[in-house]
Image (spheres, rainbow, N blue to C red):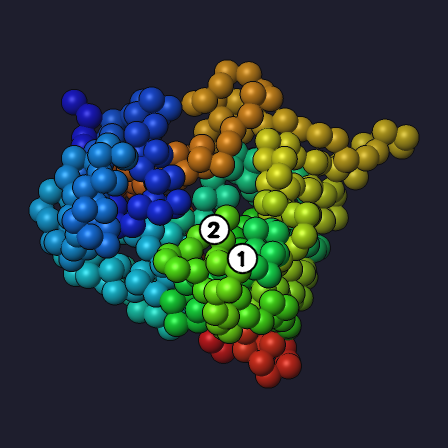
Amino acid sequence: MKQDVRIGLIGTGFMGRSHAMAYHAVPFIFPAAARPVPELVADVSEEAARAAAEATGFRRATGDWRELVRDPAVDVVDITTPNSLHKEMALAAIAAGKHVYCEKPLALTATDALEMTQAAEAAGVKTLVGFNFLKNPAAGMIKRIIDDGGLGDIVHFRGAFDQDALADPSAPFSWRFERAVAGAGALGDLGAHIISLAQYLIGDIDEVSGQINTRITERPVAGGAAGYGDKAAPDAPMRAVENEDEAQFIMRFASGATGTIETSRIATGRKLWLSYEITGTAGAVFFTQERMNEIKLYRADDPAGQQGFRTILTGPAHPHYANYFPIPGMGLGYNDQKVIEAHELIEAIAGDGPLYPDFRAGWKTCRVVDAVLRSAEERRWVRVGEV
C-alpha cells in the first residue's frame, strides 16, 4: 500500500495553483511508494479557500493558515504566499513538527532565512525551497557533465534572468514593489533563481561586487489586488516603487572560478530569459529556459574542423525525463519542473532521504542577495561571509 503524504497548501495564486497541479500529477508520472494527498488549503477568507479547494481538488478548506498548521491531518505545510509571510508561517509549521515546502526567496533577509534554517535542522523536519528551475532535466544533465569532469576545471559562469513582464510603466503597483512585503525586487524575485543555479552547478559564491537600479520609479495603484497582466485606471494615483528593477554583479566562487550575473524585470523582449553559460578548460555549455529542452555543449577535444557547440535534446538519459517520455525531443514544460519538485519532496519524506535545495541552500541564496545589495549601497566588494 502506498504511503500517503498529506499536503496543507497556504496561498492559491499563480504559484499555489502550480503546486496543486503538481501534486495531482505526481502519481501518474512517478509511480512510487508514496503519494501526495491534497488535504487542506488556506486562503485569505473561508470563501476564497472553499473556492480554491473546489478548483484545485483539495479535500478541505480554511480561512486561517494557523488552523492549517495545527491540523493533525497535515504532514507538509506548503507556503506560496508573498515573501514577508514565509518566516512566520514556516517557523509555526516547524514548531508543530511539520515538514515545510516554501517558495523562494526563503525570507526577506539572510538573517531571517538562517533563523528558519536552524529551527528546521534542530527540529529534524524536511525542508524544500521552490527553485524549480533546478529540476529541469537539462540542469541535472549539466550537473552530471560538470561533476564527471566533462568541462574540465570550471573557469567562468555567466548567468542572467531577464523578463519584460513589468517593462510597461503603466503596469500597476503590487506587493512585488513594496520592500516590506517583497524584500529585494528583481534580484530577489528573478535573480535568486540564477544564483541558486550557479551555486548548484559550480559551488558557493564567495565574494560579489554589484550595482542596482530602479528605472520605473513609480507605478499606478489599482483598485484591488494586482498581478501580472492587470491594469490600473487611467487616472489612478501613483505610488513610489521601493526596490530595484535591475541588478548586475561580478563574483568569485570559493572554487576560484569567476562569473557575472544580471537580472531585470523590465528587459524588453525577454520573456523567460533564464540563461547561463559555463566555461571550463575542456569544454563549455550554454542553456536558456526559453528553449528549456535543449543543451548547447562544446567539447574542446573534438577534431579540428568539427569543433563547435552542438545541440543536445533532453531525453530519457537525463534525470527524470524517462518518467514522462521514452524518446528524446518530446519536450517538458514549466509545470513539469514543479511535478519533479513535488515528487522529490514526497519521496524524501516517505523514505527519510535528503532534499535539495533545502532551507540551508535557500539561506545561502538569500545571503548572496543581501551581499549584492550591500555591495551596491557601499560601492565595494563584499564577502558573502560578512552577511
Q: Position of residue 93 (x, y in %)?
A: 20, 56
169 vs 32, left or right, is right
Asked if residue 370 can be seen in this view, the reply is no
Q: Which residue corresponds to the image point at 49% horizontal and 53% vertical from the top-left?
A: 231
Q: Residues within 10 Å of mark 2 (few under 14, many from 20)?
A: few
Q: Earlier in the sequence, mark 1 or mark 2?
A: 1
Q: Which residue corresponds to the image point at 54% horizontal and 73% vertical from the top-left?
A: 373
- Distance from label 1 to label 2 (Cα)? 7 Å
**In which quadrant of the rendered view does residue 146 lie?**
top right
Element carrying mark 2: loop
Q: Amino acid at mark 1?
A: Ala
For the residues labelled 1 and 2, say whether their Cβ atoms are less than 8 Å apart. yes
Q: Position of residue 378 (x, y in %)?
A: 59, 83
* Residue 336 position (above or below residue 264): above
Query: In the drawing, what numbered circle is on residue 171?
Result: 1
Q: Which residue bears the numbered disc 2? A: 230
Q: Position of residue 215 (x, y in %)?
A: 63, 68
182 vs 116, left or right, is right
* Residue 56 position (above or below residue 259): above
